[in-house]
Image (spheres, grey):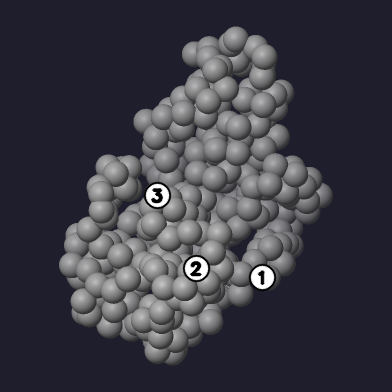
Amino acid sequence: MAEVKSHEFDGFLKRKPLPVRLFLIYGPDRGLVSERAAALAANSGVDLADAFSVVKLDAGEIGNQPGRLIDEMNAIGLFGGDRLVWIRNAGSEKGLADALEILASMPAGPSTLVIEAGDLKKGAALRKAAETSSQAAAIACYADDGRALQALIDQELATEGLRISPAARERLVETIGGDRLASRNEVRKLALYCRGKELIEEQDVEDIVGDASAISTDDAIDAILKGDRDGFMHAIQKIVSSKTPIFLVLQGCLRQFQLLELMRAEMDEKRAPAAQAMATLGRHLHFRRKPIIENALKTWAGPAIRRETQRLQAAILQSRQRPALEDTIAMQTMLATVLQSARR
């Protein structure tokens, strides 16, 4: 079937029964990918506590062997009944894409397949295999927009019988949104902090959410751009204490260098100053961050930015291929970038 847009998922999940049994969930919001994969797994009808009915694999275990996944999908449970095959950390594995294409060409069986993947580009083999088949669904997961964040806040606070003031809501929305799982955890932490109160005020948000917000992620990225090793380590400590994945900082760092690359290219092409490139391509940036990014544009040349962007991309690929070393890869890569900035 056609791709299920990010905002269409809730309606899609309510369909009984679901029209397909092969699901690819992908996108840059890893928390939302995990959350939606879990919702589909729960909706499959399989007892998730039954180890004989649920098979969880890392995409690296499939590698270039599509037969491994096909065998798992065609296997019969020890006590009969439906089975669930759940694949995590998928990316560019050829065997996984080939297996999905083969399964999608076969009549639907008793097993459900859920694949969690990263941010797949249009035309990627795995994404193409799901989008072009009537037997599979490709579900996109992008960062929450304003409406989705409002719904998330209302949903979590309603379970605790709490209301939130307009100023507090505005402050909360400013500090969450980069990752669905991290955002939900922050709202739940706020609800727990304010349990017993009738109304959440702005100060409550400042007290409990401030150090674990998206702003702390920006602090880490800004420290990287400034070459401030101590500032970077302090920001990372806050991120770790909030249980926000370090991968989000690495991903944010890549996006920042991609933006720097665009700005630097405009400066070189038009022989324009950094301030002009900022005015054209950096309107969405927080005013406090603009001097840091403008200084980075002055100190980083175009070729150096491209090399750093490629290195960050390679690190993200490595972290997906070796999920057990994700935090180590992210930290080593970002520390190297901090040193590069400091030298400049």
Give the amino acid type for the residue marked by disc 1 in the picture. Answer: Ala
Q: Residues within 10 Å of mark 2 (few under 14, many from 20)?
A: many
Q: Residue beneath label 1, please?
A: 324
Q: Residue furthest top?
A: 198
Give the amino acid type for the residue marked by disc 2 in the picture. Answer: Val
| Mark earlier in primary sequence (3, 1) | 3
Compared to 10, does 38 lie above or below? below
Tell me residue 84's x, y (percent).
Answer: 43, 67
| Mark earlier in primary sequence (3, 2) | 2
Instruction: Give the quarter of the image for residue 202.
Output: top right
Residue 142: mark: 3
Which residue is rendered at x = 41% and y = 79% of the image?
Answer: 76
Q: Residues within 10 Å of mark 1 (few under 14, many from 20)?
A: few
Q: Residue furthest front?
A: 79
| Mark earlier in primary sequence (2, 1) | 2
Tell me residue 242's x, y (percent).
Answer: 70, 42
Q: Residue beneath label 2, please?
A: 54
Q: Nearer the viewer, mark 2 or mark 1?
A: 2
